[in-house]
Amino acid sequence: MADSSVAVHSEEHNPALLHHFTEPQQQRDAASLGMWIFLATEVMFFGGLFCAYLIYRLKYFGEFAAASQTLSWKLGMTNTIVLICSSLTVVLAVWASQHAKRALLLGSLALTILLGFGFLGIKTIEYREKFENHHVPGPSFSFDEKVPGHPDLKANPYHAQIYFSLYFVMTGLHALHMIIGIGFFVWLLVAAWKGRFTPEYNTPLEMGGLYWHFVDIVWIYLFPLLYLIDLRK
Amino acid sequence: MSEHTEHSSSLGTYILIWIALLAGTVLTVFAAHINLGPFNAAVALTIATTKALLVALFFMHIRGASEKLLKLVVISTVFFLIILLALSMADYGTRGLRAW
């Protein structure tokens, strides 16, 4: 409906082009470079946690395996699939805005937000189970499991507590990123509803997409590292 | 308008990558249940890295990126992450070789 008027308007002057950029392409490249530099800092931020995880996993492998097997890999796998599907809806949203398909754009954004809440919901079920089983690090922590593959060897609860500390910090920070991501996508949905995005201007969608995919990649590593340690025994 | 097409891939590519990511997820769970000895962790990390590469290259459009500066940022990010992990592991991983 508004397509023709937008196209005519951009012939004379593009309202989305800020005055300090010479052309839309330059403006888009600047935004995407800034976003990637931000993601670089995020990679190093999570990288430090992954490094701590690797060091303790190397040192206390038996306890890490025992603690990891109290997690439900089925819930972890479900959440992985939920996030992968949300990444698809994000690229669909960007594609839809580039091709001026309003219904697909709004639908994809709404579905992304819904999948994000689905992920957090499943995460809540998992966290609740940890509280019920006293697997939350702190004074009430208790852990009474055998080391997998060694039926007569009891896992050291202090070492298992390190696993659960890393589990809560890593998945907690990941969940925080999800919450921020959902907030950003709600804003994108409102802006898309008001018709702010056109095939000529959809940079916020692309930047939101980059952030969402990064959070997805973090989970792609968290899933096998936290849920799938030494399952064969 | 031609600038736009280099930024976006076709819908078919997105669906294919999505199916590959789902397959990778099932594969990583399946592989974790087979006894591969010390190679279980290596297989899990290889699948995870492949999935991460698919997301970065196709969903985050690194493959179609025209800007060299952007590629430099991405490559240096990976480079510094490898320095962080590899040098730390070279230290802690070899401490068991003698008493510490």
Image (tube, coloured by chain):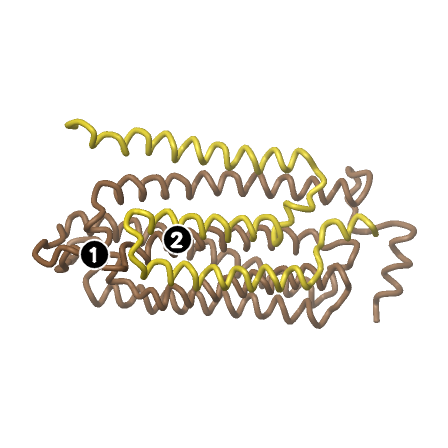
Residue B27 occupies which quadrant of the picture? bottom left
Mark 2 is surrounded, within 10 Å at the Cα level, by few (under 14), some (14 to 19) or many (20 or more) other residues, namely many
* Residue matched to label 2: A222
Which amino acid, mark 1?
A: Ala
* Residue located at (71% from left, 72% from top): A103
Q: Chain of mark 1?
A: A
Q: Which chain is yellow?
A: B
What kind of element bears circle 2? helix
Q: Nearer the viewer, residue B44 or A225?
A: B44
Q: Which chain letter goes with mark 2?
A: A
Chain displayed in brown: A
* For residue B55, above or below residue A21: below
Residue A14 horizontal/vertical position (percent): 84, 50
Residue type indicated by callout 2? Leu
Rendered location of residue A191, percent (x, y): 68, 62
Q: Is residue A72 left or right of residue A204?
A: left
Vertical placement of residue A12 versus A185, above or below? above
Whichever of labels 1 and 2 marks the residue nearer the N terminus, that label is 1
Instruction: Measure how far apart labels 1 and 2 are at the Cα level.
Output: 17 Å
Depth check: give the residue in front, A204 or A228. A228
Q: Quadrant of the C terminus of chain B?
A: top left
| Residue A58 in the image, given as x and y percentages of width and height | 26, 41
**Picture mark count:** 2
Residue A2 appears at what percent x and percent y?
Answer: 83, 67
- Residue density around tag 1, few if under 14, some if 14–19, many if 20 or more, within 10 Å: many
The residue beneath circle 1 is A66
Q: Is residue A47 left or right of residue A184?
A: left
| Image: A168 above or below A103 | above
Residue that appears at 66% across and 59% down = B13
Are the residues flagged by discs 1 and 2 in contact, CB closer than 8 Å? Answer: no
Viewer-closest of A227 and A200: A227
- The lab-note entry on whether marks 1 and 2 share a chain reads yes
